[in-house]
Image (cartoon, rainbow, N blue to C red):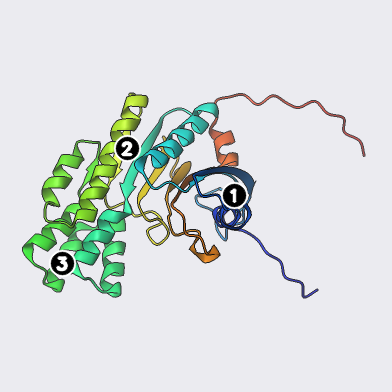
Amino acid sequence: SGRTLGVRADMTPQVARIDAHSLQQTGPTRLCYMGTVLHTRTDDFGGSRAPLQVGAELYGHSGDASDLEIIQLMLATLDAAVIDSIYLDLSHVGIFRGLVQQLQLSQSQEAQLFEILQRKALPDLDSWLAALNLSPQAATMLRALATLHGDEAILPLARQHLAEAPASVHQALDTLEHISKAVRRRHPALPIHLDLAELRGYHYHTGLVFAVYVAGQGQEIARGGRYDEIGAVFGRARPATGFSADLKTLLALSRQPVADAAGIYAP
């Protein structure tokens, strides 16, 4: 027919447009959504290319409190879905970004380092660092990123290894410490994992990133983070943070029995 067909791969840009054009509020705005999105490929084997995406977003507040609120809401959503054996993964893209800027790496070098860190390939990292001829101090900081993962005990080690990093890196570590402690107070039994080389959505997110995993599931079942530039394309780049999940996945993992709905079937 020659008519244009539009499909959405993510709900967040649509929500950002609503915040920028329809609501135009000056204070914090809290929004939630549910809708089908379309992906070119599934996130995991046997998954759906058309997940039923649910999520929540908070616009207009840039502090740790809004990130914590979204994480709390994400955990409450999984609790309402009756999903067990979960753990929370935390990271912050500002750590990698701050080191790249401090060392003045080129775009090509940044992409190479990013790819190596995602594989956590220490031999490849050592070869790359040697070829780049960085100072021993700089090489030590970049090498540390690949090994700094574990529970909250890695944060003091991170401060030690990244002592010469710029202020933005130390601010990111402060955020991770604050968020992890706050979540721990509210959920003392929840396993919390930190991975400073986890750069999920690096070119999209601007700060804290987080995800929830469950035993036996290869991919995260919920994820989110801070994306302060999301509204720029609509002329209103407000601070923003949020999370999303696939309702189909949550339903499949839930221990809550689903009652058969009564109905009348007719030809």
The answer for how far apart the CA atoms under marks 2 and 1 are is: 32 Å
The disc labelled 3 sits on which kind of residue? Leu
Residue drawn 35% across the image and 31% down it = 183
Residue 113 visible here: yes
Q: Verify CB contact (< 8 Å) between mark 2 and mark 1.
A: no
Residue 245 visible here: no
Q: Position of residue 187 (x, y in %)?
A: 37, 26
The disc labelled 2 sits on which kind of residue? Ile
Residue drawn 63% across the image and 54% down it = 22
Mark closer to the chain start, 3 or 2: 3
The answer for how far apart the CA atoms under marks 3 and 2 are is: 32 Å
Residue count near mark 2 (Cα–Cα under 10 Å), binned few <14, some 14–19, many ≥20: some
- Which quadrant is the N terminus positioned in? bottom right
* Closer to viewer: mark 1 or mark 3: 3
Residue 261 located left or right of residue 105:
right
Q: Which residue is mark 2?
A: 179
Residue drawn 57% across the image and 61% down it = 40
- Dot 2: element: helix
Q: Which mark is residue 9?
A: none
The disc labelled 1 sits on which kind of residue? Ser
Residue drawn 55% across the image and 49% down it = 25
| Observer-nearest of 158 and 256 | 158
Q: Which residue is mark 1?
A: 48
Q: Position of residue 223 (x, y in %)?
A: 45, 45
Vertical order, 54 against 215 (above or below): below
Q: Which residue is mark 3?
A: 129
Mark closer to the chain start, 2 or 1: 1
